[in-house]
Amino acid sequence: MITRHDWSLEEIQALLALPLLELLWQAQQVHRAANPGYRVQLASLLSVKTGGCEEDCAYCPQSLHHSADVAGRPELEVEPVLERARAAREAGAQRFCMGWAWREIRDGAPFEAMLAMVRGVRQLGLEACVTAGMLTDSQAARLAEAGLTAYNHNLDTSPGHYERIISTRTYQERLETLQRVRRAGITLCCGGIIGLGESAADRAALLQVLSSLDPHPESVPINALVAVEGTPLEDQAPVDPLELVRMVATARILMPHSRVRLSAGREALSREAQILCLLAGADSIFYGDTLLTTSNPAVEADRELLAAAGVVAEPLLTAARG
Ligand code: SAM
Ligand code: DTB
Ligand code: SF4
């Protein structure tokens, strides 16, 4: 299978608009070749530093620009975070993702704590992922040295639609952060959100930027907007689940070897719609009853979902050491 980085907008738009069953068939063929055992990665999320963020991302309940801002939650310390990582491992997770509502990482005690968390999560035999905004080369190097598996930094939407969603950070800054993470040898987790009022052409343009990254991001989260009261997007109409299926399938075709993660918004999907997303090539989900600040399906429901779909979860990569 050839991995391409030169997909044109027209090609991507044509894929997104294919008759649904044709799109699913193409995505399935790509997926089966790339992931023959069809294993699904379970990634658990924890918000370490919640709310009070200086950025103004219109979808986000953690921005201090919106009345939704979840203020007053204390930043978590190392041991309680590792306790949650152990519990996630017990529940069957393979990756543990930690979030900080920051515009960028600053040096000092919170960063040292982040490094200790990364080391601790890796010692548990879990993959470790951090999402904490922009970073410097030396911070990226220290994260790599601590054993960080992946850094999550999303492009969110197309270059054209972006300025309607975020004004405090440019698209170019996001691309530079992604390069810095790559240069440090950390894998990239980078995707976007649908349901932000974007057009089909915007969705294609987001997928074009993602698929032009060389190498492709190792994981590509596809989120459906969770419209939170008190954010500027609170009244946004929910996305048609089949639009999410199309986005997942197209991402799968464009980036055959990436993990395509069915991310925020699963609570609004029926079991059957989620199974269609798996069929379309999603091979990872967020696992655990909360995302960062909003809820996610219960662990038990997800076990039933995977059983109903007849897919198995990826086992731990390394023997547990702690
Ligand atoms: N502050 C860091 C940053 O923006 O890189 C890390 C945390 S931020 C919450 C991580 C990602 O979550 C965002 O880039 C966005 O794609 C996604 N996200 C945030 N709020 C969301 C919502 N209400 N619905 C869907 N996705 C959301
Ligand atoms: C991603 O793309 N989605 C996750 C993770 N990366 C960090 C976050 C979703 C957040 C949904 C809104 C909330 O719970 O605050
Ligand atoms: Fe801050 Fe990240 Fe939320 Fe934007 S998405 S407001 S950067 S926490």
Image (tube, grey):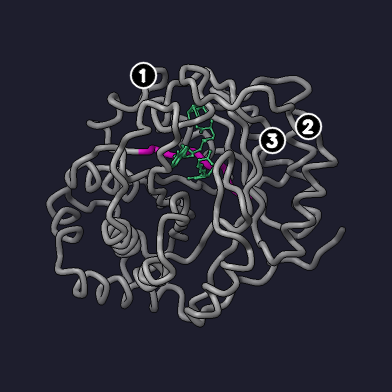
Instruction: Kindly identify the amino acid type of the residue bearing the numbered disc 1.
Output: Ser
The earlier-in-sequence mark between 3 and 1 is 3
Identify which residue, 245 or 208, lies in the foreground: 245
Q: Residue at x 36, y 19 (%)?
A: 167
Q: Residue at x 18, y 47 (%)?
A: 200
Q: Residue at x 60, y 57 (%)?
A: 43
Neighbour class for label 1 at 10 Å: few (<14), some, many (≥20)? few
Between disc 2 and disc 1, the foreground one is 1
Image coordinates of residue 180 in percent, x first then y, are: 51, 33
Image coordinates of residue 89 in percent, x first then y, are: 74, 61
Real-space Cα distance between discs 3 and 1? Answer: 25 Å
Label at residue 48: 3
Label at residue 167: 1
Q: Which residue is mark 2?
A: 113
User: Is the C terminus in the top left, top right, bottom left or bottom right quadrant?
Assistant: bottom right
Instruction: Kindly identify the amino acid type of the residue bearing the numbered disc 2.
Output: Ala
Image coordinates of residue 192 in percent, x first then y, are: 38, 44
Q: Are marks 3 and 1 in contact (CB under 8 Å)?
A: no
User: In the rendered image, which quarter is residue 15 located in?
Assistant: bottom left
Identify which residue, 129 or 196, lies in the foreground: 196
Instruction: Kindly identify the amino acid type of the residue bearing the numbered disc 3.
Output: Val
Residue range (magenta):
149-156
